[in-house]
């Protein structure tokens, strides 16, 4: 049974009737108090723009390398406002958007990329433990689910790829898949027990914020950087609404938000990804779906759902309908898109009809920064004084730390294993500018949806493949 197109389920409207437009993870009474906005001119050795995982790891690692470095982090809204506080909470060792994609684009560098990715995830887990961060990290792997016959035919190849690169994986036939999680739509799956798991993104963001403050990082929330320019002293001046910052070095960690460097507009596509969270399930509803491993689930396809249980046994259900708005719009008002949330709700009840009557309490959307090769664009500007790492393409909860370390390498002009890899040395192919960009994205989306329905990768997608191009969420 395929998930597209779907007939509206009878419970859809009622399930969304009282849903609040709010991020579940940050909707907590014990959220930390915001640090005050910058209100005067100041200076810093290192200015970090953006208070998500990339910015916070940059601040922490910079201080751990050299505690005497004066580090200032400014965040336009508040810590955990961006993707870092509103994601699905899947955490993956992969730096290459999965083993299959890494093997396709950087086969020679895969051993190093895999090792660095695993070391990176281990370092995150060790840090969480050492700092006592209550981030509910559970390295339980995940299961990719086949919903169509053609997805089932991909499972043996997916298994080979995972085993070849040292992952712990097994193919599940229909019965084995159904015995793990019960849904009439499941035809099979790939259970991957290694390489990642789940965590609580807001608690991790807030824990990193506290760790940065403990190390003496100065943080100003509610402080957008409006413009960067060269300073007379050879550094960079960042203009904010109520003060300027004269910095020797700047690290840009602004993800899919409007880039401060024009060159990044060419390399990154801002895409809105949508999420629902249900009310907590009762014990009997939980037993109706099984899910004893409590791992993350995704379906196999270009347009895919990702879903998981929360610590209080709600279901977070997101993905599928990733939307690009003409002209790279990132206006937060676009986060409330009824048709995307209704589609998600219909697909949810098609997957779990036994949960008919369940209501959603939270809905939101967030910005994903896609590059044409699904891996970040990392580099420098302004004569090496500014570094950037954006474009994690929906898989950045762990890769953001790799991006942070790479920015510090580049700013300090160190040649390292990281900076020698193509993921840092080479830039992804640029997206065409508007007015071409929007129609090409729409056309590509329609071809991706057709492949999900038919299992056939048409001429357009095969042409993009030849050049290593695409976009993803
Ligand atoms: C709905 C959704 C689900 C996702 N699910 C997953 C998942 O399950 N697993 C996974 O690995 N990844 C997932 N991702 C992606 C992941 O969240 C990101 O890759 C990661 O959080 C990126 O961190 P970041 O610090 O680079 O960006 P962000 O967390 O977005 O932080 C960027 C920050 O920069 C600030 N900013 C922007 N411009 C300025 C400026 N001019 N001045 C000051 N501040 C500025 C923003 O306010 C924002 O807080 C998801 C993303 C979304 C949106």
Image (cartoon, rainbow, N blue to C red):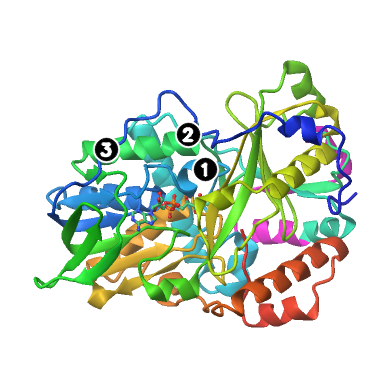
Q: Position of residue 297 (x, y in %)?
A: 69, 43
Magenta segment's dominant SS is helix
| Rendered position, 211 above or below 406 | above
Q: Do the numbered discs 3 and 1 sit on residues whose CB atoms are within 8 Å?
A: no
Specify which label sits upstream in the sequence, 3 or 2: 2
- Foreground mark, 3 or 1? 3
Residue positioned 78% across, 30% down in the render? 14
Q: Which residue is mark 1?
A: 86
Specify which label sits upstream in the sequence, 1 or 2: 2
Q: Which residues are magenta?
A: 157-180
Q: Position of residue 8 (x, y in %)?
A: 86, 43
Q: Which residue is mark 2?
A: 26
Q: Which mark is residue 35?
A: 3
| Rendered position, 278 above or below 282 | below
Query: Within 10 Å of the Cα at label 1, are there few (<14), some (14-19), or many (20+) other Cα atoms?
Result: many
Secondary structure at badge 3 equals: loop
Q: Residue furthest top?
A: 283
In 3D space, how far apart are the residues under numbered discs 3 and 1 (Cα atoms)? 20 Å
């Amino acid at each position: 049974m395929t998930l597209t197109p779907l007939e509206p389920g009878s419970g859809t409207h009622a399930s969304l009737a009282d849903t609040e437009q709010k991020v579940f993870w940050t909707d907590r009474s014990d959220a930390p108090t915001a640090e005050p906005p910058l209100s005067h001119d100041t200076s810093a050795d290192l200015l970090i723009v953006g208070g998500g995982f990339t910015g916070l790891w940059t601040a922490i690692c910079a201080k751990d390398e050299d505690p005497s470095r004066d580090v200032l982090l400014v965040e336009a809204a508040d810590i955990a406002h961006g993707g870092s506080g509103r994601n699905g909470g899947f955490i993956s060792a992969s730096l290459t958007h999965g083993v299959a994609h890494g093997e396709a684009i950087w086969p020679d560098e895969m051993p190093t990329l895999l090792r660095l990715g695993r070391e990176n995830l281990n370092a995150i887990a060790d840090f969480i433990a050492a700092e006592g961060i209550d981030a509910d990290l559970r390295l339980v792997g995940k299961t990719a689910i086949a919903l169509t016959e053609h997805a089932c035919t991909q499972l043996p190849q997916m298994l080979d790829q995972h085993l070849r690169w040292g992952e712990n994986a097994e193919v599940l036939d229909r019965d084995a898949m159904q015995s793990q999680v019960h849904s009439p739509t499941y035809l099979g799956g790939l259970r991957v027990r290694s390489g990642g798991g789940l965590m609580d993104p807001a608690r991790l963001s807030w824990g990193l914020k506290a760790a940065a403050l403990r190390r003496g990082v100065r943080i100003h929330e509610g402080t957008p950087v409006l413009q960067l320019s060269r300073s007379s002293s050879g550094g960079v001046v960042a203009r904010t609404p109520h003060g300027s910052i004269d910095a020797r070095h700047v690290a840009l960690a602004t993800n899919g938000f409007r880039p401060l460097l024009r060159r990044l507009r060419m390399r990154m596509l801002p895409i809105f990804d949508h999420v629902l969270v249900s009310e907590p399930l009762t014990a009997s509803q939980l037993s109706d779906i099984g899910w004893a491993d409590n791992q993350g689930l995704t379906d196999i396809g270009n347009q895919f759902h990702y879903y998981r249980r929360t610590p209080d046994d709600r279901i977070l259900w997101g993905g599928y309908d990733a939307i690009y708005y003409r002209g790279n719009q990132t206006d937060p008002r676009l986060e409330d898109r009824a048709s995307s949330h209704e589609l998600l709700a219909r697909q949810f009840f098609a997957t779990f009809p036994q949960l008919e009557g369940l209501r959603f309490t939270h809905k939101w959307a967030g910005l994903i920064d896609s590059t044409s090769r699904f891996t970040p664009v990392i580099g420098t500007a302004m004569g090496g004084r500014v570094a950037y790492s954006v474009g994690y393409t929906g898989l950045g909860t762990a890769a953001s730390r790799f991006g942070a370390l790479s920015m510090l390498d580049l700013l300090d002009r160190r040649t390292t294993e990281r900076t020698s890899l193509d993921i840092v040395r080479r830039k992804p192919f640029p997206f065409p500018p508007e007015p071409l960009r929007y129609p090409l994205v729409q056309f590509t989306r329609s071809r991706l949806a057709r492949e999900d329905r038919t299992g056939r990768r048409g001429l357009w997608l095969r042409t993009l493949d030849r050049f290593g191009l695409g976009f993803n969420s």
